Amino acid sequence: MRITARLIVTLALTAGLVVGGATYIQLRTERGRLVEDLERRSAILAESIDTAVDPALFTRDRKKIQQFVGKFSNRGRLSGIAITDAKGDVLAATPVLQDEAATVIGLAAEALKSETPVVKFIKFKAGEQHAYTLALHSDEGVVTGSLIILQDTTHVHARLRDVWRNNFLRLLTQVFLIALVTLFVVRWDILAPVAQMAEWMRHQRAGDDSEPSPLPHTDLFGPMAKEVKTFARHLSVAKTAAEEEARLRQISESLWTPERLKDHVKMKLGGQPLVIVSNREPYMHRYKGREVEVIVPAGGVVTALDPLMRACGGTWIAHGAGDADWDFVDKRNRVRVPPEDPQYTLRRVALSAAEENGYYYGFSNEGLWPLCHIAHVRPDFRPEDWTQYLAANQKFADATLDEIEDQESPCVLVQDYHFAVLPRMIKERRPDARVALFWHIPWPNPESFGICPWQTELVSGMLGADLMGFHTQYHCNNFLETVDRTMECRIDRERFSVIKEGHLTAVKPFPISVHFPGPDRDKAGDPSVKVDKPALLKELRTKAEFLGVGVDRVDYTKGILERFRAVERFLDKHPKYRGRFTFVQLGAPSRTHIQRYNQFLAETDAEADRINWKFKASDWRPIVYLKKHHNHKEIEPYYRAADVCMVTSLSDGMNLVAKEFVAAREDDDGALVLSRFAGASRELADALIVNPYDIDQAAEAIRYALEMPAEERRTRMRRLRETVKENNIYRWAGNLITELTQIRPEPRPGVHSA
Ligand code: F6P
């Protein structure tokens, strides 16, 4: 029942009870008064009759008595009189009582016995009567008879009915008025302000913080409104705080930082040092004349893993390839790096020239590299290289086993195609070790991989690892297909794992990334963010309005020739850019002992030359080809000054240049042209994605990069930066280590748990 109805019913019932009670009392009083009046009248009449009738009664003169009685027969409310003798025999009676002889006798008998008058209400056919009966006495006090006086009571009942009716009508009026007043009071004084307050609270809930309009009847709702306002204010403050907290939590949860990774690794590894194995060392000491310089070699592994090791500490085992490397190690071939601020240990592994030739140049880079990159360079597989590959892997395995000797269930992260058989070598000696192998280059389809004469040994060696990581799901799928075609084993395609001889290898994608500069460097507009482009170009002896940049090891997989040709086509098609656009290629010569690389270096050089010759101008060069190793500090200004960065790999696992360029653009400017054949294209969808073999398309991408609306360029770059910031190298390492530490280690041989 609604509040109004409940209130009306309650008030009406209360009024009914009050009116009912009052009516009852009034009826009793009224009736008493009327009966008393009847009695008083009867008594007066009786007294006068008693005196008048006494002589006739004494003589028992019936006639006289009857005449006397007859005189009273028609007086007002008097409806009858009867007189009896002392025995109760009727001497005279008015007509009403003549018909009721038995009643009269009964009344007379009662009165004759009583000393006081007997009063009764008696029902006659004519209606209810008030009977007043008393004994008559002679002057001497002798009972001479009895007198019965009947009075009509109709007026009493009529009066009482009037009282009932009047009070009922009064009650009805009261109830009607109560309902009306209640309705108005509830409607205007309660429901309206409550509805107003509810509406305000609803707005508050929806986030509208406006003040409520003043409520009527501040006396009634004022205190409540005040409390509600205070409550809403507190709620709003709490909501803002909760939102802020959630935002911060989300940021800190989604953002991996060196500190977070450090804590994560500490927690996951329980304080054990992390062990990384790669071919390329992160810091190389080499002679420059009489001086020794330390260089950071170009390439994805070093770019990605150095920040990780700086954050977590541990040991990095790598080939000591620098000619001055051995002057800086201790007797266990260790050196603390980075040299200017040591944070982790580099353990160098020495390789003989034969080992380096067979394992690194031969099997790794003339065999596996072209095999895995579909770049149309024929792989060469020589048995002697394979032998050296196995020997070198064993050497690295021995160094690793030495490093983990004192550790229980150590975690070892093996890097890349140089070490396909290393995981099994470690696990054979230390089954308790948790070993991950991360493959930094693509994994081809099974048909392409099938041409390798040692495919079974390679795949079997890889499956020694507990975890196999690739950059993309596509490479994981190719790997599982290859395993399926190569050997007897069980492949769980739902959980992406291989079970061979009871050992499980999980196969998962972990897209690698770079360090993303922290907020202290994220100030757009900071003068340090801007680079003096004309000055940079002046140093290169060219003038240009627009700058394109490419940064690569000089490798046939990087699409450098195609890039140069795209620049040429762009200038052919859009002559207005001649003299206004220069493309700077920073090319680190790489693997130059390999004939194909040597040739390729010459080819790229010749191609740059040809194009420059074609557009010959005195103060402008379309292509500036800087063939030397550049460190990060040297590369950074080019990234920052470029209008467009070109990454046109013909095949690439990830390509971190694309991510480095994005990370460097704190001004949210610059465009990225990115090959669809680089793993990075899966994540960096806001780049201008091209097929590098399609020279026209790549040329058009350069034009669009320079001409697209500034707002679009910024929007694209902002989105690219968000992606790289979130999916940085610390997240990559965090995910990899989480996966690895979820593996239940097998027991260490010779060590039995209690
Ligand atoms: O990313 C593939 C890779 O082979 C890495 O292993 C290495 O860091 C990089 O390319 C450079 O190659 P290299 O070590 O042969 O100079």
Image (tube, grey):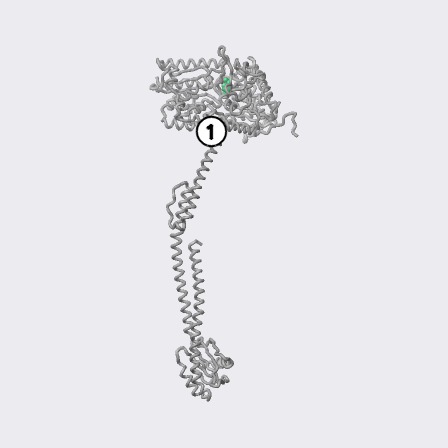
Which is more toward the observer, 209 or 749?
Answer: 209
Is residue 179 in view? yes
Is residue 539 placed above or below 68 in the rendered structure? above
Count of residue discs? 1
User: Residue 365 at x, y = what percent?
Assistant: 52, 17
User: Residue 96 at x, y = what percent?
Assistant: 43, 80
Is residue 66 placed above or below 208 in the rendered structure? below
Is residue 472 in view? no
Is residue 58 placed above or below 739 in the rendered structure? below
Which is more toward the observer, 470 or 347?
Answer: 347
Residue at the disc numbered 1: 726
Q: Is mark 1 within 8 Å of ligand 1?
A: no
In which quadrant will I find the N terminus?
bottom left
The furthest residue to the top: 289
Quarter of image, res 613:
top left
Amino acid carrying mark 1 in the image:
Glu
Quarter of image, res 81:
bottom left
The furthest residue to the front: 140
Quarter of image, res 639:
top left
User: Residue 356 at x, y = what percent?
Assistant: 55, 14
User: Residue 734 at x, y = what percent?
Assistant: 52, 28
Which is more toward the observer, 424 or 736?
Answer: 736
| Crowd band around label 1 with a 10 angstrom C-alpha radius: few (<14), some (14–19), many (20+) | some
Q: Element at badge 1?
A: helix
Is residue 172 placed above or below 659 in the rendered structure? below
The furthest residue to the left: 576
In which quadrant will I find the C terminus?
top right
